Image (cartoon, rainbow, N blue to C red):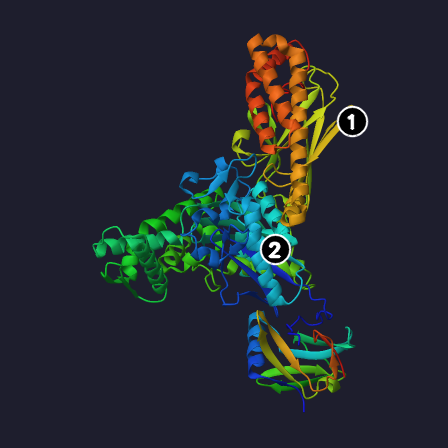
Amino acid sequence: MALFQIAEPGESAAPHEHKLAIGIDLGTTNSLVATVRSGLAVCLNDEQGRPLLPSVVRYHADASVEVGYAAQVNQAVDPRHTIVSVKRFMGRGLKDIAHVEAMPYDFVETPGMVKLRTHAGVKTPVEISAEILKSLKSRAEAALGGDLLGAVITIPAYFDDAQRQATKDAARLAGLNVLRLLNEPTAAAIAYGLDNAAEGVYAVYDLGGGTFDISILRLTKGVFEVMATGGDSALGGDDFDHRIYCWVLEQANLQPLAPEDARLLMMRCREAKEFLTLHPEAPITARLASGEMVDLKLDVATFAEITRTLVSKTMQPVKRALRDAALRPDDIKGVVMVGGATRMPQIQKAVGDFFRQEPLTNLDPDKVVALGAATQANLLAGNKTGKDDWLLLDVIPLSLGLETMGGLTEKVIARNSTIPTARAQEFTTFKDGQTAMSIHVVQGEREMVADCRSLARFELRGIPPMVAGAARIRVTFQVDADGLLSVAAREQTTGVESSVTVKPSYGLSDEEIAGMLQDSLAHARDDAMTRALREAQVEAERMIEATEAALAEDAGLLAAAEEEKIRAGIARLRAAAAGDNRRAINIAMDDLGFETQEFAHRRMDQSIKKVLAGRKVGEIGMGEEE
Amino acid sequence: MGITLTDNAAKHVNNYLTKRGKGIGLRLGVRTSGCSGMAYKLEFVDAVNEDDLVFESAGVKVVVDAKSLPYLDGMELDFAREGLKEGFKFNNPNVKDQCGCGESFNV
């Protein structure tokens, strides 16, 4: 017998045509899934009635995967193959990740996104996140009794294009249709119905298990713009547990504890913290392995005292974000509290005192982001029509621009522009007789390209030789409704054109996604390997050709011994490319790239001299590895 | 006869109505569609129409249009959980036959 939900007047769905949509909060510590039932957003619980799914994935030697509580339990037993907080690695290279040395994982340094070596093979953060999403997806399908139309997935407001793309890739890999990526603070504001409220500026204070985020949002005509964000990626509720733990050690005069005692006591400290939300005093009792008893009472005042510095540590980014947005606390119309740690009374008091108003706390702070995502998903699925005048515009989180001379960023589309959008700007040549222009697309707010994120590079060739500044090159940036960018360049006098659809350098190409999907089907594994090998061979051929061409032209720049070394490198690469060991090919390519560095420098110097004599600049950097 | 709600169903209806912030009751109805001929309607009510009949059961105002009533008379609306699923359940004595999923039926 079917189970029915109550529809809006006149909007009962035809049998078997319910449009099932979900919202997913893909969190660093925990993830949730929510949907709208009978007009009400609710989180979907697992079989044990728990709404949270710990964002923990454990890979076994037999290639099976455990997600959630089951994986979390084994974190201490099998840390290397039990991945926690994978969100921190999404769309990130090894050098972008803080405290790598303290992590128990076996990182694989690869161009683009970092990878982790596990029992089940080398995994990307995208694949690991996809496991979490798959688990939530099957929970939702069981709870809703049908196929899902799609999902809204939330991401931090500060996520750049690469991190957004990685999140989207993970969803696709999990078999989810992404209706939209939604900024977490925006989702929280939607859960509170602020999108239907009066226009104004709102603050979202999000203190999770291990991260703190503050966002300042402006609501104008139904669109939330992120005015400023800030936070501390290493500050969360866990730090409060730790303060209580230290206090207990001190009060009970305990020596440093054995791991199991420490774990037990830490758990008691967490329970005490949660107890103090509603009670004036919490007991902390534990029997240690030595038989020693810990029996203490922690009151609210002491708890506030020992965590005072943590609370004030969250207020600094709040002040900074307000300053970035050029606002004062009085300008904030409402404050939304997100994250379980905001249940602590001292946090609510500090936030209330600072903004001089009661923060919004009547929704469960653990669920509020997922609930907002579900509300948005329900809307995008077309389950709510008419009267509600929602404008579903999204904005670009970070400015998009390109590199100009001297490594400076020229912004073409400013952050917070609503999408879809297209904007064009004209550029010109820098040198006399310049026939090519390298276009480097970057994302970020900083002035120097080095501080922004590189998204793509392409070249416009065939510019007729003219004096510097005479060519007119129109560069058009276009962002579609999904936030993906394409860039085109056109020389106006001759009409030569060049363009790219930007696949952010950390994102995965369609082929790579397809490759991974194939990978998961055992019979297709060999195909994928063959393809990857072929790609490496093609790349090696390209490199050999380029290096030989450079030698043919400029061997004179090298001493005989240097030329010999490069030729030996070419021979080694050629030998490797003839074999079927992809790793060997990549190593040989890296070696040759290294051997030719100095050569490339000299060629570049020479080219610059030629340019000064009015020659081509388009050929520089040819000997360098891309 | 009429239509009745179980206490559990009434509790959920009232909760949804409160959270929705408006609405006077619950509309039940049938329409012709679906794989077995007819399909149920279950909606919030903002306004009562001329040909509507209004019942009161377990403190909830139940609205049925006159045409639908013969198909629903004597039924009970319950709220149930099955595994992770939850929702309202039509216990309808008039039904002779229904499709496998129960979303559509025949009298």
Q: Quadrant of the N terminus of chain A?
A: bottom right
Q: Which chain contains the residue that carries disc 1?
A: A
In the shown orientation, is residue A94 left or right of residue A490? Answer: left
Picture quarter containing residue A563?
top right
The crowd level at tag 2 (other Cα within 10 Å; few <14, some 14-19, many 20+) is many
Can you identify the residue that label 1 sits on?
A: A495
Picture quarter containing residue A291?
bottom left
Can you identify the residue that label 2 sits on?
A: A152
Q: Nearer the viewer, residue A436 or A563?
A: A563
Q: In what element is the residue under mark 1?
A: loop
Q: Residue at x 35, y 50 (%)?
A: A310
What percent of the width, then of the height, locates residue A318? 43, 47
Is any atom of residue A438 visible in this view? no
Between the residue at mark 2 and the residue at mark 1, the CA separation in whole angstroms equals: 41 Å
Q: In what element is the residue under mark 2?
A: strand
Picture quarter containing residue B55?
bottom right
Q: Amino acid at mark 2?
A: Val
